[in-house]
Structure formats: structure tokens, C-alpha cells
Amino acid sequence: MAVERTLVILKPDAVQRGLTGEIMGRLERRGLKLVGLDMRTIPRDLAARHYAEHEGKPFYAGLIEYITSGPVVLMVLEGPQAVAVTRATMGKTNPVEAVSGTIRGDLGLMTGRNLIHGSDAPASAVREIALFFGDREPQSWERSVDPWILE
Ligand code: DAT
Ligand code: MG
């Protein structure tokens, strides 16, 4: 099974609501390995590059306002099919449709305050990790419990 990396952003609402630990804990407990971590406020130009695919859509301006409105926590996670596993753990984009047990389904109510970003495909993950962590290498480390998580 392909080992992938994915970019996660714990959005400003997750930080302001004190949910970063809760959300990081869920992703850690899933078995994904943390290989990058940072806290910062995303500048508008970087937000625009990150969300370029949504430019021109009715929610675009609000999305840029929201994602740049305060500090976020950025994570790079690694594991087999890390992109799909992270998306499944997050739940659907609209928290109303996200099933219970998912991050958005348990902790959110509205699409414009849906707590978390996760790359939507391996190619997007490569692009987004370069965008946010391009100037540094992900942390490589041996995780002693790996034989109990990975076949
Ligand atoms: P996701 O974040 O699940 O990958 P997306 O890439 O389609 O979803 O959209 C990016 C973000 O834009 C999403 O997390 C919240 C916002 N958004 C998407 N569709 C929206 C809509 N119809 N109304 C308001 N905000 C929306
Ligand atoms: Mg997306």
C-alpha cells in the first residue's frame, strides 16, 4: 500500500475553539504519523494560491477571509493512503452531511466553519506541502509502535 503524505490545516475556528488537541489526537490515534507541524497566520497571497481552484466561486471571498482570519495549525501526516484516510476521518465538507464519528460530523455545523482542511488527492498533497513547508524537510523519525499499526 502506497505510503503518502498529506497536508492538514486546523483552521482558525479550530484554534479559537480550543479544538486543536482534540483534532490532532483523532488523527494521531488513527495511526497517521506526524512529520511536520507549525502554527502561523496564513497571508492572503498564500491563501489565494492554496485555494486557487475555488477562485470565482461565490464562497471564495469568504473562504479567504476565514482562512486568513487568525492563526492556524499546519500538519504533515504520513501513512498508507494518508490522503484518503485523513479525508475519511475529517468527514464531508458540509458538517451537516458529515457522519457522526468524523471530525466535522462531531464538532462542526456549517461549511464555512468546518474546522479542518485535508488535501484531496496525492498530487494536491505534494503541491500543498511544497506551498506551506517548501523551505524545510519533513521530520523523519522512527516510530517504535509501527509494527503494531502497519502490517
Ligand atoms: P474540502 O475542504 O472538503 O476539500 P472544498 O475543497 O470543496 O472542500 O472547499 C474548500 C473549502 O471552501 C471548504 O472546506 C469550505 C469552503 N466551501 C466549499 N464549498 C462551499 C460552499 N458551497 N459554501 C460555502 N463554503 C464552501
Ligand atoms: Mg478541498
Image: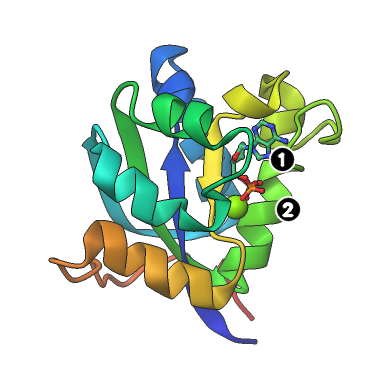
Residue drawn 59% across and 66% down?
83
Q: Does residue 69 sit above or below 42 in this rendering?
A: above
Amino acid at circle 1: Thr
Is any atom of residue 15 visible in this view?
Answer: yes
| Residue under pointer 1 | 93
Residue drawn 56% across and 50% down?
54
Is any atom of residue 75 visible in this view?
Answer: no
Position of residue 97 measured from the top left corner of the image (x, y, whole percent): 86, 33
Check disc 2 and report its element: helix, strand or loop: helix
Q: Label 2 vs label 1: CA separation? A: 11 Å
Position of residue 136 measured from the top left corner of the image (x, y, whole percent): 14, 66
Foreground mark, 2 or 1?
Answer: 1
Whether disc 1's CB lies below 8 Å from ligand 1 is answered yes
92 horizontally vs 9: left or right: right
Which sits in the foreground, 27 or 13? 13
120 horizontally vs 18: left or right: right
| Residue under pointer 2 | 88
Q: Earlier in the sequence, mark 2 or mark 1?
A: 2
